[in-house]
Image: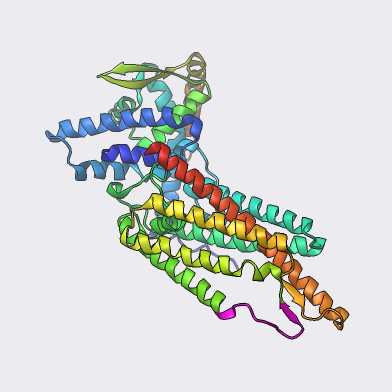
Amino acid sequence: MTLVDRYLRAVRDHLPRAEQDDIINELSDNLQSRMEDEAADRGHALSEDEEAAILKEFGHPMAVAARYRGDERTVTFGGRLIGPELFSTYMKVLAINVAITVLIGAIALVAGATIWSGFAGILVPLAIQFTIVTAIFVVIDRRWIRDPDGWDPRTVTSTGPDIDVSTLDGISDQLLGKAYPRAVSIAASILEIGVIAVVLTVALQIGLPDQIGPFEPGPGWEDVYVPAIAVIVFSFVTPVVNLFRPRWTRFRVASHAAADIAVVVIGLVSLALGDWVVLVDPAPATADEASVVEAINTIVRISIAAAVVLTAVTAALEIRRLFRMRTTA
Amino acid sequence: MTTVDPAPTNAAADTAFENLRLELRRGALVVAVLARLRSEHYGYALRKSLAEQGMEIDENTLYPLLRRLETQGLLDSEWREEDRRPKRFYRLSATGRLILARLLEQRTELDASLERILTENPT
């Protein structure tokens, strides 16, 4: 695939689906015409460096696509925070987050949360997600503003279905540049190993205590503890393999999907089993102790339901990505 | 006590000039594109043709502009093969001709007004 082809693919990723072919065909001809003129002026076929210089002058694929979208919307607060190049992607990410959060809130209400705790369970995560997503996009936008030429057409990759880039890699690519995809993948694997190691350590340290005061773990923990630890251990396989094989993207997507499905199954089993904290001896328990048990179980039920929904969505996205990779292979 | 606005710095003046220059150019570019498309051109050839007349226009401004003008009904386009490659040729539509004529009338009136103002208030 030529430099121009890769560039056009990257532009295509950010165009409205209905207009992609039309715009790319036209852009392709205009670019080729210009390259031919330049080659005629210079008296020789253009080298890759010369082609890259023309593409660089033409503009970053996201900036080019933004001009075609005619979308001038920005996020401003005093000055520009997020420009039109990123605005539509920002809105999509935010919309997905809002949809998932509202869904989780609805599940929490169905699961028995009070109206107030249900709303709190929606509004607090919404505020956190809004802040985090906005902050990430502001950082990416800043990088563009400060260094609009800080990209190299030779390292542009399409984020379309044919080239897999995980979310973590995608963010890393935007922040660190696309010049070192192998390094980005290895860095992401190391980060993933670190996160899983922390989760496993915490899970094993906490373990399942026999008894805390008048309380003890209920069937919702006891029966899923060992499978949950097994899934965490299995999760090490992906980043460890990717440390040595950083571009095994299909393997990464497939193993992430498998782990996500296992988490969903364990979560559903845990929800079906119910109580996560029970009283050691219900007979002499006070009303306060009983209400503490009820509150803890409600919070855990909502948390597990939320985790199941989020993981199911992630698993579906991973499986879709896997299918797309297969069909475009 | 009256306050006096501090004189703008060179950088601020340059920015202000640049913004005003772009604003002034924006309308002129559309008229130039419409006028040039009284005869048929494809995108890159149009850009070259405008540049030859001293009207440099950025590719990322021109190509999306052509699509927008077509969507507004001012241009017609047709895919045709030339030099063994399919190219999209644009030309002024009937509506585009009417609008261009009206824009040129406006331009004449604006020029005349501006000329009178400049003559009465010379620098």
Could one spot residue A166 in this view of the protein? no
Q: Residue at x 26, y 19 (%)?
A: B84
Q: Position of residue A324 (x, y in %)?
A: 45, 40
In the image, is A89 to the left or to the right of A147? right
Q: Position of residue A233 (x, y in %)?
A: 48, 67
Q: Is residue A43 above or below residue A278?
A: above
Q: Quadrant of the N terminus of chain B?
A: bottom right
Relative depth, front residue between A287 and A285: A285
Q: Number of numbered discs present?
A: 0
Could one spot residue B4 in this view of the protein? yes
> Is residue A152 found inside the magenta-colored segment of the image?
no
Q: Is residue A226 above or below residue B22?
A: below
In the image, is B39 to the left or to the right of A69? left
Q: Position of residue B122 (x, y in %)?
A: 44, 41
Relative depth, front residue between A286 and A247: A286
Magenta: main secondary structure: loop
- Write down the region rendered in magenta: A205-216
Q: Residue at x 54, y 51 (%)?
A: A315
Relative depth, front residue between A48 and A225: A225
Q: Position of residue A281 (x, y in %)?
A: 81, 81
Q: Quadrant of residue A289?
A: bottom right
Q: Residue furthest top?
A: B94
